[in-house]
Amino acid sequence: MAALPAPQISLDLRGRAAGQWRLKDGVEMLRFNPDAFVQDWHAHFPATVAHEVAHSIVYRRFGLRSVRPHGPQWRGVMAELGFPPVVTHQTPLTGRRSRVYVYQCKCQSHRLGPRRHHLIKQRGYRYACAECGGKLEFHDQVEWREQNH
Ligand SMILES: [Zn+2]
Ligand SMILES: [Zn+2]
């Protein structure tokens, strides 16, 4: 097999996976979840990097023919690289969560993001309901919004 170009590397993975190897239009991509590395650097560097690099090596050696993702070929490469063949990680990744602040006017509740909440609390901004004209009041009600990509 002719030498393949190096995989593309990106740090845009979200959700529960710490890393991902994928092939898209013939181009390999190694994607990593920055939240995993922020939460537990030592668990993921270099083990998660090795995990994904091993997928790339398996692809380069064996192609895509009947190779299970974490099968014997992959485990063999991990052993060559000097890593245990760990498939799952222990970092509690929940995807991206963001706070939502629940405000009330006279007619309904309004869900504001952190930026507008900050402007109201720290800068004294006022927001009125477009329907009843009432001022939005905050009663310490916070929700979480999952942002899975
Ligand atoms: Zn894998
Ligand atoms: Zn209203």
Image (cartoon, rainbow, N blue to C red):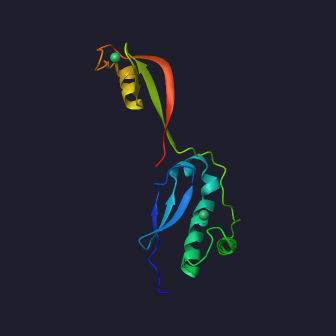
- The image quadrant of residue 17 is bottom right
16 vs 111, left or right, is right
Q: Residue at x 61, y 49 (%)?
A: 40
Residue 131 in the image: x percent, y percent?
29, 19
Q: Residue at x 55, y 58 (%)?
A: 19
Residue 91 in the image: x percent, y percent?
63, 48
How many marks overall?
Answer: 0
131 vs 91, left or right, is left
105 vs 63, left or right, is left
Q: Residue at x 45, y 23 (%)?
A: 102
Residue sitting farthest toward the bottom: 1
123 vs 30, left or right, is left
Observer-nearest of 128 and 43: 128
Quadrant containing ligand 1 reads bottom right
- The image quadrant of residue 92 is top right
Residue 149 in the image: x percent, y percent?
46, 49
Q: Is residue 96 above or below residue 76?
A: above
Residue 11 in the image: x percent, y percent?
47, 56
Observer-nearest of 42 and 65: 65
